[in-house]
Image (spheres, grey):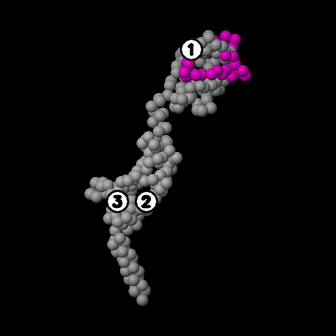
Amino acid sequence: MDKYQEKLLSKTVQLSLSSDSGNGLCVINESSLILQQNENYKIVQYLFKIVNPAIEKILIDDKTFKPLKSVVSFDVDFNTPFKKAVIYFINDVAEPLELAAVYNYSDRVAFDTKMDYEIAEKNRENMHLALLSDSSLLNIFFKKSNESVTNIELKVEAVFASEKYIVLQETIATNIEFKAVNHLTAGQYFVTIVEKDSSNNIIAKDTKNVFVKDINANFDELSGKLEEVRRQVIALW
């Protein structure tokens, strides 16, 4: 690209690669027209658009595209890439600019990983796992994350000396949204809910922890508060 071509290209007010499903990116450098696919690799068809009053036409391989009110546009398909673009300027004020077409495809693995994570997070939130504890009692509330769930697995683990021990592990009917676990000793507990579909694929998973208090400690705490109130009352006399 010489200085005259560069100056004429600087008149560009819009350069885009758009799609109703998600846009890509477009860049013109010294020798290339770079087309960047949207992160969603399933989007392959775009509309290229450049708005520049200095352009007379653009040749895409053997097809010519002329401007309409300074706008040149044409379809881009990542499944059928073209090889080069040649930009012609009005009145031949500069030599035609030949650009090699460079297609940058999105990372399929990265996009699928991102989508799987977002779906898993949404399903986890839809479970609404919540824990309420009382002396020796743990109440577990949860919901099916979606209608594809056919299997719900529950695991309750107690923590003693930094080690986890399974207290309860069972499969729960999909129409159940509550489970009570009784006669627990004081300490920290972890509750894990795993929801699976008919093919045993994990649909949603969540783990929360809670502390179960000793009933005697509760009485001691209450007695201490009553004793404090009693001393305050005596002091007022």
Instruction: Name the one closer to the observer, 198 or 87.
Output: 198
Closer mark to the observer between disc 2 and disc 3: 2
Residue 218 at x, y = what percent? 37, 72
Q: Amino acid at mark 1?
A: Lys
Q: CA distance from mark 3 to mark 1?
A: 66 Å
Residue at 61 percent across and 29 percent down: it is 19
Residue 80 at x, y = what percent? 56, 19
Residue at 61 percent across and 28 percent down: it is 18
Residue at 58 percent across and 22 percent down: it is 77
Q: Tell me where residue 53 sits by quadrant.
A: top right
Q: Disc 1 designates what residue?
A: 84
Q: Tell me where residue 69 sits by quadrant.
A: top right
* Magenta-colored stretch includes residue 100: no
Residue bounds of the magenta highlight: 65-94
* Secondary structure of the residue carrying numbered label 3: strand
Q: Is residue 137 visible?
A: yes
Instruction: Name the one closer to the observer, 171 or 82.
Output: 171
Extreme-left residue of the structure: 161
User: 10 Å neighbourhood of mark 1: few (<14), some, or many (≥20)?
Assistant: some
Q: Could you say which disc has been placed on residue 188 in the image?
A: 3
User: 10 Å neighbourhood of mark 3: few (<14), some, or many (≥20)?
Assistant: some
Residue 138 at x, y = what percent? 40, 62
Q: Could you say which disc has been placed on residue 179 in the image?
A: 2
Q: Is residue 97 visible?
A: no
Pick whichever of labels 2 and 3 is earlier in the sequence: 2
Quadrant of image for the N terminus: top right
Dots 2, 3 in contact, CB < 8 A: no
Q: Is residue 104 left or right of residue 18?
A: left
Q: CA distance from mark 2 to mark 3?
A: 18 Å
* Magenta-colored stretch includes residue 69: yes
